[in-house]
Image (cartoon, grey):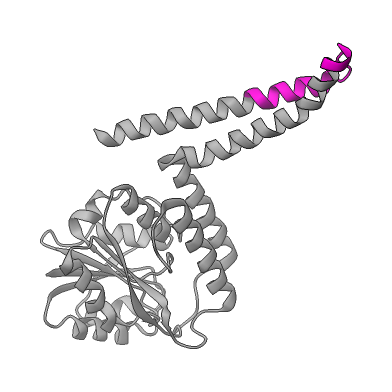
Amino acid sequence: MNISVVIPTMDEPAIEGVLHDVFDALRQQTVEVIVVDKSQDETALKASELGAKIIHQTGTGYGDAYITGFKHISKDTDTVVILDGDYTYDPYDIPALLQPIHDGADLVIGSRFALMDKGAMSRRNALGNRMITALVRSLYHVPLTDSQSGMRAIRRPALDRLKLQSPDMPFATEMIIEAQKEGLAIVEVPIRYRNRVGQAKLDPYKDALSILFTTVRLVRDYNPIVIFLPIGLVLLLIGFGYGIGIFIEYINTGVVTRFAGAILSVLLILTGLQIVLFGLLADIVLTNLRRR
């Protein structure tokens, strides 16, 4: 394989050790390392001295760094590997990610929970990760245990098919959803996860909300019936439930005394019906577009 390893960096004191291990782990392969840097220290200089190609990130965000790096991979690259430059991921696990690629997988994701060092991830982050992963697994039927892992390998042709746009942390989720939408073979393998060297750059609460909103937005865009059908049915049930008492009153007395309630019931029923029909129509349109 010709392999491109893309690493985003921002003031990474462990970058020398990470790059040394990357080159050593892939010494039997043809490899280029692309460091997408937005540092104020000598991270870029150290990486360059060790043989990495340095791309200075002009935008901001985790996803933006990878999208920028992908634009600079060599034309003859077969497989792209991504990982962080903070020592949390072990480059010696890269061959474990490449094996499924060799066997036919398109996207391989490293699951950190099987071999995680003590204290490498806080309980809060672990809980948030599992909740987001459960949501992705439920909505998109992807059998993953760690949807937010930042160590992955992907075939170059598969990467070229993905429409990756998120500049921030939702990039990791977006890659999985895009891959599922394209019908790519997604595989998960256990990897080691270590304690970070250097300061964390993430805001867990902001990033978690951003990932959640992106996940829901992508459901709306790629599988709208999952969003619109439940909402429409709920409004229909509320409308019918609220209006049945009024209807019974009319049957028994021939008079409607709760005009406001009757109007509200009709509005809920009509709105719910419109939402259901819109979801069905959008699903039909997207299905036809995918078949082209």
Q: Is residue 253 magenta?
A: yes
Position of the N terminus by quadrant:
bottom left
How far from the left and from the top, in percent, is residue 107? Answer: 27, 62
Question: Which residues fall within the magenta stretch?
Answer: 250-270
Can residue 58 be seen here? The reply is: no
Between residue 56 and residue 197, name the one nearer to us.
Answer: 197
Q: Residue at x 22, y 75 (%)?
A: 52
In this rendering, position of residue 157 left or right of residue 270: left
Between residue 268 and residue 59, name the one nearer to us.
Answer: 268
- Against 168, residue 40 (above or below) is below
- Against 99, residue 172 (above or below) is above
Q: Most prominent secondary structure in the magenta stretch?
A: helix
How far from the left and from the top, in percent, is residue 28? Answer: 11, 81
In this rendering, position of residue 218 left or right of residue 191: right
Residue extending farthest top: 254
Q: Dividing the picture into quarters, in which one does residue 22 lie? A: bottom left
- Against 288, residue 94 (above or below) is below
Can residue 124 be seen here? The reply is: yes
Between residue 263 and residue 218, name the one nearer to us.
Answer: 263
Q: Dividing the picture into quarters, in which one does residue 18 lie? A: bottom left
How far from the left and from the top, in percent, is residue 114? Answer: 41, 80
Q: Residue at x 43, y 61 (%)?
A: 61
